[in-house]
Amino acid sequence: MEPRNAIRFYLNDNLVELSDVEPDRTLLDFLRIDRSLTGTKEGCAEGDCGACSVIVARKMDENLDIRTANACIIMPAMLDGTYVVTVEHLKGKDGGLHPVQQAMVDYHGSQCGFCTPGFVMSLYALWLAQPSPSVPAVEKALQGNLCRCTGYAPIIRAAQAVTDYGDVIDDALNTERAEILAKLAALGDGRRVVVRGARGETIIPADVDDLAAVLDERPEATVIAGATDVGLWVTKFMREIAPVVTIGHLMRDITVADGRIEIGAGVSYSRAFATMAEHIPPMGELIDRIGGEQVRNMGTIGGNIANGSPIGDTPPPLIALGASITLRKGSARRVVQLEDYFIDYGKQDRAKGEFVEAISVPVPGKNDIFAIHKVTKRRDEDITATLGAFCISLDGGTVTDARIAYGGMAATPKRARAVEAALIGQPWTMETVEAAMERFEEDYAPLSDWRASAQYRMLAAKNLLMRVYRESGGERARIVRHEEARGSAMPEGLQ
């Protein structure tokens, strides 16, 4: 089948066909410069502030999967076969302000107004999913939107009042859903897409087999899943990225079987959340702290692994769990333990033209202590200074196995093998943990940077192990035994 030479998607219900788009052209520039849709703002140009938020809807089976995204770091080629909505398209049932917009007006949710369109789009997506959201749900939806004027209290009040201004069933993305799904189905022709601009070529593979063939042909290509890293290469570092291969539409399955979670490399954080939160709750808590909602909607677990960053959030816990990855080149596949994939800074066990296809994650056993702790300057939407992941197996109070991995402590995500050795075979006690803390310098020699000093990282890493011990009940059990021996009650703060 001959390749198609145009990217096709719907923008505010109008079909867009692009045959000469540049590989590093952002959606934000396309909207503002080419289509004069200036409600979508540029604030940070790195996916942090949310002023550029738009909605991207994809056909998932027979449903419409509606997500927010940062237009400043994604490229039009990533939108092939989707339905994109900007703030200009919103309107109420009578043609006036949309319920979200009217609530923002009435509850004084806007001051200077620069960030307001982005907030409106994030609240719109939330309203479609949860017409009567709780305060925590609103806060989660707005993690990726920053406001420097009003504070967030009036915006939260507006979010909870939207349904007072209209029924979500009457919104266009619901009343026209069948029509939108039919339009998107008609765009899915199963063909490879190849478009060329002055600065190079963009390829959208038809399927995973086609991806393998493309990378065999063009092993030097920049592979883009969610663009949460590559987008910054373009907007901050002005890097040449052509040729580009976009894969965010591929490898999106996640299943649970035989005590393992099988994750396609193209599964986004948002798509993984429910499964991970159900079967490995600390992973769900971690996902909630990766970027904002827009980043989680686009960023992928496979991409977080493939780029090899020493401060990627998912590799340390996946290493602690004993995860493996499937690497593919052409028709050949090989399985590698995730901890062995990372060789050195910027170097991974991946050949030219080889790509991460899937991740296999064991679910912890009922006698395992599994914990993840991420240290950042602010709680939400911040890059890790250090992150510790711990999987401790106990039998009768004795540590039978320990897998501990950290990010931000070395040139790669790395096991704490000396610390593990100090724990295995020992009783799970304060004395054992304190002895193991003395072994950290054998495993790590962290660097100082603007996120944290080497000394801080080392102290924090040690203290995270102590935290795991205390939160596991070890300290509580010790105090209970001590107080029972004295015949007095347990201190109030530990009840």
Image (cartoon, rainbow, N blue to C red):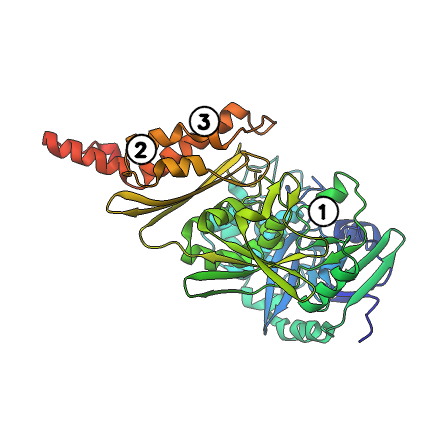
Q: Residues within 10 Å of mark 2 (few under 14, many from 20)?
A: some
Give the labeled residue for mark 1.
231
Picture quarter with the N terminus: bottom right
Label 1: how many Cα within 10 Å (few below 14, some 14–19, many 20+):
many
What is the x, y in percent for residue 213? 74, 65
1 and 216: which is toward the camera: 216
SS category of the residue bearing label 1: helix
Task: Tell me where residue 199 appears, x and y as whole percent.
Answer: 87, 51
Whichever of labels 3 and 1 marks the residue nearer the N terminus, that label is 1
Q: Are marks 3 and 1 in contact (CB under 8 Å)?
A: no
Q: Position of residue 156 (x, y in %)?
A: 51, 46
Q: Amino acid at mark 2?
A: Thr
Q: Which residue is mark 2?
A: 432
Task: Locate residue 62 relative to residue 321 in the image: left or right.
Answer: right
Up-down relation of residue 490 to residue 20 (above or below):
above
Of callouts 1 and 2, the N-terminal one: 1
Can residue 51 be seen by looking at this rendering? yes
Residue type at the position of mark 3: Leu
Choose mark 1 or mark 2, whichever is in front.
2
